[in-house]
Amino acid sequence: MAVGYKTTASGAENFSDNLCRWKKGSAGHYEVWFLTLNDRAGHRGFWFRYTLESPPAEESDRRPHAALWAAAFNCKAPDQNFGLKSEFPLDQFLFEGREQFNLRVGDGFFSAGRAAGRIDGADHSIAWDLSFDPNKKTYHHVTPKLNLMLRPSSFVCSPNLDTRFRGSVTVDGREIVLEDEPGCQSHLWGRKHVDEWIWVHSNAFESHPGTVFEGLSARPRRAGRMLPPIQSLFLRHRGEEHHFVRLRLSEQWHRNLGIGYWSFSAMNSRLYIEGSVQCRLRDMLQARYEDPDGEPLYCINSEVANLKIRLFRRTHGVRYRHLETIKAHSTAHLEHAARDFDSTVRPAF
C-alpha cells in the first residue's frame, strides 16, 4: 500500500485525489472510498465504504460489482456492534468527475462534501446522511520516489485526513444527530491489496482539538515475495507537523503487534514519539475482503479504540526531554488486515 503530505491545486482544491482510477471496462482493479468518524458523547464510532471490484479477465466466473458497507460500534454496549454490506451490479455504480465529483453506488451517494446511504439487513439497518468540510491538502504516506522503487500493487491517500462531520446516522431506527464530530476520509485503489497492514487514526485527542495522528505499517508483496514493513507516521500537534517514514524488520514489527494492539516509536530531527493503541476484542469486527483475483483478506476494525502518545523533544545530541502525553479515549480508529481469518474476532456480517 503506497500512501507525504502534498498541496494539490485549488472549493475542494484536492477533489482530484478522490477521482475514480478505474477505466470503464478494464479488469483486475479494486477501488474504495471510506469514511470513519466518532460520536464522542455517545462513545460510538462508524465506518462507511463505497467500493468497486472488477476481476481479471480470466476470472470468467466472477462478475464486476459495486458495494456499500457500513459498521456501527458502541463502546458502552459492544454487543450492539455490527456491520452490513449490500452488493450491486456494476450498472448501479456511477461516477461523474470534472471540476467536482459525484459517486453513486446503489442508494449510496458520496461527493466532495457529503456522504449518504442506507443498508438494510435481516436484523439490522444503518442509514447515514452526513456533510463535511473538505480539506485543502491531501495526505500521502509514501513519497513518489519510494513508490517508484517499491512498485506497489495498491495505493492509498487521504483527501480529508482531518475533518468534522454534521448530520445523522440512524442505527436500527434510532437517530444519532452529529454536529462537529471528528473523522477522516480516504481513497484506495489498485490491482491487489497488500498482504498485511496495521492502521491507526485519531483527530479527537482530549484537550487538543487541533491534533491529528495517522499511522500505517504495511507489508507489500513484490514478485511473489513479502517485503519488510513500511512504517509511515504523521503527527500534527500544537501547530507543528511531523513526518516519520522508515522500513522495519518484520521481526520487530510483529513483536509490537497483536489483534487489538499496536505499539510504535519513531523519531525525526526534532521529535521522538512512543505510542500505543489498543481496544478490547469485543470492540472489533472482522470483515472479509476479496482481491480482484478472488484471494481473501480479513480486515479487523474498530472505531472506538484508545490511543496514547508520549512526546519527547531533542535537547542535546541524542538526548530527549519528555514534553507531554496525549490521549484519545474511545475515539481512535484501529484496523489490522491479514490473509488468515482470526477466530477470536466476531465477523461483521
Image (tube, rainbow, N blue to C red):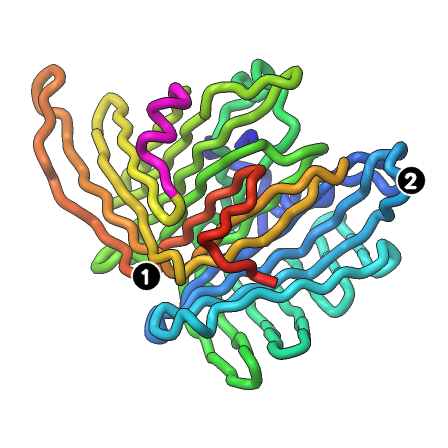
Q: Residue at x 37, y 22 (%)?
A: 251
Which residue is pictured at 86% across the width and 42% down the height?
A: 24
> Could you say where residue 115 lies in the image, as x and y percent from the top left?
61, 64
> What's the magenta region?
248-258
Instruction: Report the residue that reaches farthest toward the bottom.
Output: 173
Q: Amino acid at mark 2?
A: Ser
- The residue that mark 2 highlights is 60
* Residue position marked by numbered label 1 in the rendering: 330
Residue 254 included in the magenta stretch of the image: yes
Horizontal side of 320 relative to 170 (left or right) equals: left
Residues packed near mark 1 inside 10 Å, few (<14), some (14 to 19) or many (20 plus): many
Q: Earlier in the sequence, mark 2 or mark 1?
A: 2
Say what secondary structure mark 2 lies in. loop
Q: Residue at x 47, y 79 (%)?
A: 177
Q: Nearer the viewer, mark 2 or mark 1?
A: 2
**Helix or strand or loop: what does disc 1 sit on?**
strand
The percent position of residue 325, horizontal first and vertical second, equals 16, 46
Q: Position of residue 336 (x, y in %)?
A: 47, 44
Residue 115, numbered circle: none
Residue 331 lies in the magenta stretch? no
Q: Amino acid at mark 1?
A: Ser
| Image quadrant in which you'd find residue 109 | bottom right
Query: Residue at point 66% right, 15% down?
Result: 223
User: In the image, 159: left or right of 318?
Assistant: right
* Foreground residue among 159 and 9: 159
- Position of the N terminus by quadrant: top right
How far from the left and from the top, in percent, is residue 313?
15, 31
Q: Quadrant of residue 190?
A: top right
CA distance for labels 2 and 1:
44 Å
Horizontal placement of 343 versus 288: left or right? left
- Asked whether residue 35 is in view, the answer is yes
Please identify the quadrant where the C terminus is shown. bottom right
